Image: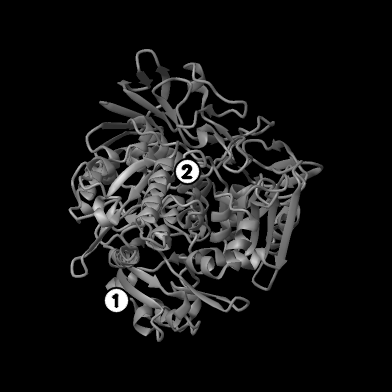
Amino acid sequence: MKKMLLIDHNRCVGCRNCEMICSLVHEGICSPSLSRIRVARDERAGWNVPISCSMCEKPMCVMICPVGAAQRNEETGLVLIDENRCIGCLQCVQACPFGHVNYHPNRGVAFKCDRCGGDPQCAKFCWTGAITFEPVDLELEKRREETARRAVSE
Amino acid sequence: MSKRLQVEIDKCTGCGLCQLACAVKKSNQFDPSLARIKIYRSEAQGLNVPLVCQQCANPPCVAVCLMNAADKDPVTGITVRESNHCIGCRACQVACPFEACTYDHIHDVVVNCDLCGGHPACVEICPSGALQYCDINTILAGVRHAEGLKRSLIPDRERSHHG
Amino acid sequence: MASILIIGNGAAGNSAADAIRRADPDVSIIMVAREELPEYSACALPDYLSGWISREQLFVKQWRDYRQSNISMLGGRDVVRIDTGQKRLVTNREEIRYDRLILATGSRPIIPPVPGHDLSGNFAVKTVADIEAIMVHRPKRVVVVGSGNIGIEMAEALHKQDCRVILVEMMDQILPRLFDREPADRILEILAAQGIEVLTGARLVAVNGRNSVEEAVAGERVLACDTIVWAAGMRQNVDFARDAGIQTGELGGIKVDAFLQTSCSGIYACGDCIESIDMLTGRPALSLLWPNAKRQGAVAGLNSIGHQVAYEGAVSLVVEEIFGVPVASLGLTAQALIGEPVRLLEGESHERYWRLLLVDDQIMGMQVIGETSGLGAVMAMMKNRISVSDFHKIVSDPDLVRTASWYLPASQFLIP
């Protein structure tokens, strides 16, 4: 069963643990500018929204890449950027409507979430449960449960 | 250095002033063919598209250069060319997806945008504001902020989820 | 990993050395090469002959570049043998141990053993020494054998030095590997207009002369000349590799896997000497071009120190100027695509002549005579297998075309 990265922004407190662990796991140091997942925040308005690649089925980054570095794997459904082929032109960074693709401050290449190869660490370390990695059906079941509960209580 | 030339295509009127400003500043000639920025005009679609060097981190032009004349400046991160070593073969022109390489027919070498040392002439002269010189990270933060705002407005009971 | 040994000081060898040093500042890198010169671009040798550039401008590295990168370059070395069991290279001067070996030995010009091929006045084109030997010889009437891009460039360079030049080509058209017949004939007209005589369908069978070259016999013609410049193809330098038990392919180059490792574990190969894979067809191919050598060198270098970089295959990109007219050949020609259902798109304006070769909606090759702008998008589409239908979908969608605007210049070729 395919697992999906689920983000409940209402549970996010903006601690940015996810950014710390992501950069640590991928780059060896805790550094938000090297994180694949980024928490968009507005302290005045009071919201925190973790943003990470949604693994689109028709990815803009794949369409725009002039060297084929961004590819979608049909089997896993993951959209990945091959750093060895990336020329750092940053078309994908500009093209993603959601800002999922980042620009590496040291190597100048594009990088984004790769789901840690199947065991996303951000989900593991998110202590509020804002980020979870769950099988799809489970999510659907929960939603059906919620809908049912709502229907019954109203 | 993460400042780059940003292009807002819908604001470009195709006036070509950027090409003239560039040619005058970089080549001292009132000759748009010497401009490092090029306007691709598509009348059928009503589009005017400025094309310019993207200052790639691992440029195809550097990879293909038969004289190893193109390289990245280690300090500024700009794609630079040693004109003394360029034999004007134009392999880079074909290797670049962005039409960044301009053939200087006066000196028989290839040149590309060097961001005018931080004060791009094309940005200064662009009357519609289609050309901007700004930090990619600032733009990216703006995109994420807008996205976060959109999602934050989704009420409590409905979860947002990603694939 | 203690030491990497690289045989060869050309584009591939240096690209490998530089890639290794960038990734690992500590590992020992030793290069051995026949010539005692820092790296230079063999592509620019005709420009040196013509006087367009100076000798200094040929060099892409200086000795200090090797020192600064802590790369030890030992020139004047010939390979005696490789001892793969003991991981030792035996040269004419010493024995060198290695942990990993990279073969970047390149290729050498073919001079067919026709009568008189070893007379004084016969020259090949590969090294600085070759060009300087031609200069010292002071040629007046030259027969250039072979009309590939090296032959054409040499013909032009010699013409610029006020020589009378006759170009002899075995096939029935010039530039047989890079251009289809029609564009090749157009280029022939450019040469003819400059006074260069071109004989196609003619094979050089003998060189006559007492102590030096006096005439060449090509086809039915006897050509009075004082110099023969052989530009008739290259042979890969793989003999010592074969002797060491390293496998070579059916096309004659060293066989490598997707990571450019040879049949012998721990030995990698890159550049002219390997049997490569064509990026577009997936079939074995020889691609003796500087950009491919550089890319292969970088891949082999990184893999030799433990990275896992797959090589995406070689693609042909040749751009040159022939008497002031730029010409470009991208990808495959009709000859290379023989047997495939090729669709041809052609166009001509005052600026240029162009033709695109398509197979099943994919761009497989392009040839241009004249203005070379606007080809970058086509090249990128060809390498990434972006079909013509995909292209139309993108440029006709108002949102997509604004985001992916780099595709647009290809419209002048793909939208009638």
* Position of C112 relative to A121 (above/below): above
Q: How many marks?
A: 2
Q: Which chain letter goes with mark 2?
A: A
Identify the residue position indicated by label 1 in the image: B119
- Residue in the image at 61% along x and 62% along y: C393
> Which SS class for mark 1?
loop
Residue C95, numbered label = none
**Image position, residue B80 (x, y; %):** 35, 61
In terms of depth relative to the viewer, which is nearer, C340 or B146?
B146
Identify the residue position indicated by label 2 in the image: A77
- Residue type, label 2: Gly
Q: Answer with the quarter of the image where residue C85 lies.
A: top left
Q: Answer with the quarter of the image where residue A82 lies.
A: top left
In terms of depth relative to the viewer, which is nearer, A53 or C171?
A53
**Image position, residue C64 (x, y; %):** 26, 45
Q: Which chain letter goes with mark 1?
A: B
Residue density around tag 2, few if under 14, some if 14–19, many if 20 or more, within 10 Å: few
Report the residue that reaches farthest toward the right: C220
Mark whose residue sits in front, 2 or 1: 2
Q: Is there any visible trace of residue B136 in the rendered image?
A: yes
